[in-house]
Amino acid sequence: MSPIALLLLASTTFAAALPSPALIVLNKEEATLAIVDPNTGKVTGRVGTGDGPHEVELSADGRFAYVTNYGSKSPGNSLSVIDLVAQKEVRRFEVTPMARPHGIAVSEGKVWFTAEANKVVGRYDPQANRIDYLLGTGQNSTHMVMLNKDSSRLFTANIGSDSISIFSPTPDGSNWNQTVVPVGKGPEGMDLSADGSQLWTAHSRDGGVSVIDVAAKKVNATIDVATKRSNRIKLTLDGKYALISDLAGGELVILDVATRRVTKRMPLGKMPEGILLDPNGTRAFIAVAGDNRIDILDLKTLTITGRLETGAGPDGMAWLAGK
């Protein structure tokens, strides 16, 4: 075989086969995306991103990962587009003059992201490779963004303004109307109930959780869970528990949704951050960023059954379903 043929063969076989399913993990401190086989715990691929990658979502077909590069010492200003099959960054899209892109959501082929430094949400069109819409919140530190299942509501957590924004499209679909819902101090993590009727948000500065009635657009309950600095909240698929990572307290707090009482506090280590559920609802993956690992929580026994090492400072995660 000729040297050129050998080179071509090597270039097409260098990337390991994509696991099915796969856990996608961002490692903030080393600016990488890790592809992990969740059944074996092995990292099968690693791709460089922009500085300080924080959150990741996948395209509907699972081919591409979209990453917000928040930055570390200086503000980040880009999105990474990563081909998971080829295991390479195929594009780094600059969002300047916006800065500190953080939260991310994918809907109808478009990528919504927050620009925390600018009080806006941007929408990136990967096909056209351009930002095609900007939505101002007027709220400080717009950090996280999510949409409900039919994209009829868009939500942002605004840490600096102690508020949640609920956006609804205008009748002609050309714009969005905003309702600002005051909550506790420093809302950061948020999640929707399975039926979309409630939005739960964990406050990073007062140890509380607000439960918002989405239809009424107001808080119907505030729960004191005594966290030191809540980072993320995730409702289990059966609706039984709310999982809250306490970054400063080093714990995972498990809250019973029905009784609204703390069921368990689990010491994990330094800086628990991102939380992801597997699609069948039996496991939760919790990124313990300060200890450079991910803990696997069995949701039936509420015990840690495994650990993964994916890189330095793991945080944002996504799940690539098996085929």
Image (cartoon, grey):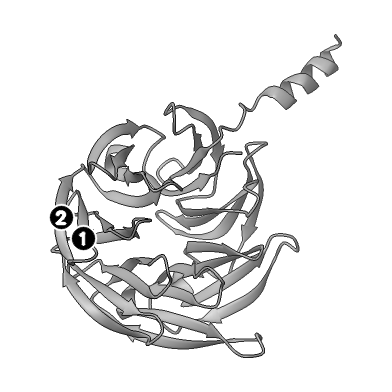
Residue 270: numbered disc: none
Q: Is residue 290 left or right of residue 223?
A: right
Which residue is at the front of the view, 214 or 9? 214
Residue most toward the top?
1
At which x and y percent is residue 70?
46, 58
Quadrant assignment, res 155: bottom left
Residue 97 visible, this angle: no
The answer to whether residue 134 is left or right of residue 139 is right
Image coords of residue 207 (percent x, y): 17, 67
Picture coordinates of residue 239 (x, y %)? 33, 60
- Residue 267 in the image: state x and y as whole percent: 16, 44
Q: Residue at x 54, y 70 (%)?
A: 98
Q: Determine whether label 2 and label 1 are within 8 Å by CB.
A: yes
Q: Nearer the viewer, residue 231 or 62?
A: 62
Residue 263 bears which disc, if any? 2
Q: Is residue 178 above or below residue 79?
A: below
Residue assigned mark 1: 256
Q: Quadrant of the N terminus?
A: top right
Give SS at disc 1: strand
Q: Amino acid at mark 2?
A: Thr
**Which quarter of the image is occupied by the C terminus?**
top right
Q: Is residue 286 left or right of residue 172?
A: left
Residue at the limit of the structure toward the right, as seen here: 2
At label 1, the amino acid type is: Asp
**Which one is earlier in the sequence, the residue at label 2 or at label 1?**
1
Tell me if residue 229 comes above or below residue 250 in the rendering: below
Q: Is residue 207 left or right of residue 1?
A: left
Secondary element type, mark 2: strand
Q: Residue at x 53, y 37 (%)?
A: 21
